[in-house]
Image (cartoon, grey):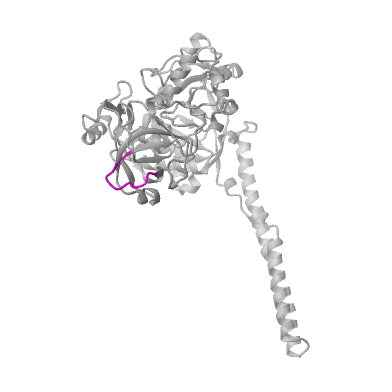
Amino acid sequence: MNTAVGEPRLLDLADYTLDLPPCSVSLLLNYYGKEELQKLIKSLTIPPKSIAVRACNGLSAKELGERIQKHVSESEGAVSIHDELKEAVIVKSRSRKSSQIFSKLVLVTRACGESVLRGSNVYIPGIVTCSAGINAGDTVSICVDVDEVVRRGGSNIRDGGRLVHIASGKATVGKRALCSETNGIGVQVLDSALPWKLPPLNTVLPPHQSYGQSIPAMIVSHVLVNSLSNETTQPKVLDMCAAPGGKTSHIAQLLRGRGIVVACERSLKRAQKLEETCSILSDIDCKCVVPLHLDITKSVISADGGDSQLKKTVNEGANRRKQWKENKRRYFAELSQTRKAEKVKLAESADMLYQGLITKEEYEQRKNESKARIAHFIATYDQSGIIPEIRHRASSIILTQSSTVNDLLTLGVSLSVKNRLNIIQGFEQETFDAILLDGPCSALGLRPRIGVDEHKSKASSLLSMANYQRKLIDIAVRLLKPGGTLVYSTCTINPLENECNVAYALQEHKSLSLEEQVPYLGQPGVSGAGLSEAERNLVQWFNPAHEMDTCGFFCAKFSKSMR
């Protein structure tokens, strides 16, 4: 779009549509009609009219609903318990007049704008800049800098690009504080650009007994846990890509302390967030969760050798530690010899100075040269062999088919957070009774979306993401016990990552078959993506443009045949 600098185009949210790359639109048109796709894309810019919150850690949905209702007036929203998911509290917005556009503008980031549409106030870190002359108490329009061309803290708010008006509110502080402070609420949101407004729940929800989560995301956990037989008293469950921990903690909650949930995350930062979530909910729900900093694609231990593989790994760890100690001993021995030799040379120079054979300046020069030789030894010595490889500690273990749940939980509790995240370095094949694969995806189902990352949403990226998910499916099949359940889910409308990947799993892994899901609240999968009509009726597709009004989501349940 050509917009002259200094003349930003101010759009109302109703007139804004996501700009997906043309190549991605062409790809999606292979599975959706033109009109259907337009509705899908438009729906992604609008938030659902309700918020779902999961009561957990000993708090009932009734008690949580009563707490919320005390802070949310009848005019702001209606609070109820979900008909199927009895731990889910639904806060539904009320219809109201949409906000008007005011002359004073506050520009916010995309992420901040999306949070505002979900009911949040504007926090100062999310503010890009604002109009001149704003004082505390002024009514302002909140706009998103969609094209991200306005400089943060810039004095000229009209630097060009598109601004999408999403809400109006009252500034809590003046312009200077809005653009310079690092925390606190900058604008209290009063009205939304939509004909409804979700109430803010940030300060209402008890952090240790509630978790904001969409209904489709909750359904996934129910589908997995409902597949576990009552005869499996101590099930081993794997969450392959677990951060930030919403589904992990929900699975643990539904298991009611039965068995173990191993939750993996390859990013250290996200693994720490996962551990934080589990710690917050550890009083009751997450006592059976073992969070791990582990790349699941490198976690499968070959079944060849059985216990000998475990012994080999432990011995390798012990040998590395032994080698490290030997290298360290050799380094300090050589350093000591170097220092002794230089000390002898310096003593000889001191005698020569005393006898008048060299001047004081020559002695100082020799002294400095001696120090330089020691420093050179330290700087040039290969120290790679004396730095221990922390991630290969001999204390790390491999989870096998015979590993006991109690032993693992006891060991995890006894370790520090850093060590607990590295307690397990791999898994033997066919170890788990149930696996959740809610892996990385294009996230083209999350609502609301104001702007997209063109690099992540282009067709080549969508294809690449689908291929990576297939790699994760292959690993899941190897780790799943015969007779076990694999639940595959995404939060995208891209059939390549949904139905096409299910078709791939069925074709490449003959041991897998699709199973009915309980509960089943979604719609059948899309046609033309490799699934038969019967298979499409077994997967759940949550259409964001459907009257159910959820995010775009997909879920499939597989079982692995017995040998």
Measured from the top left, where is residue 499 in percent x and y? 52, 18
Q: Is residue 251 above or below residue 150?
A: above
Front one among 338 and 26: 26
Task: Classify residue 364 as left or right of residue 103.
Answer: right
Residue at screen point 33% across, 47% down: 133
Give left or right: position of 503 versus 155. Answer: right
Q: Quadrant of residue 379?
A: bottom right
Residue 214 location, quadrant: top left
Magenta span contains residue 138: yes
Q: Is residue 198 magenta?
A: no
Relative to 92, is 350 above or below?
A: below
Name the chief secondary structure element in magenta: loop
Bounds of the magenta segment: 130-140
| Residue 294 appears in the rendering | yes
- The residue depicted at 46 percent of the width and 19 percent of the height is 38
> Whole-percent x and y of residue 130?
38, 44
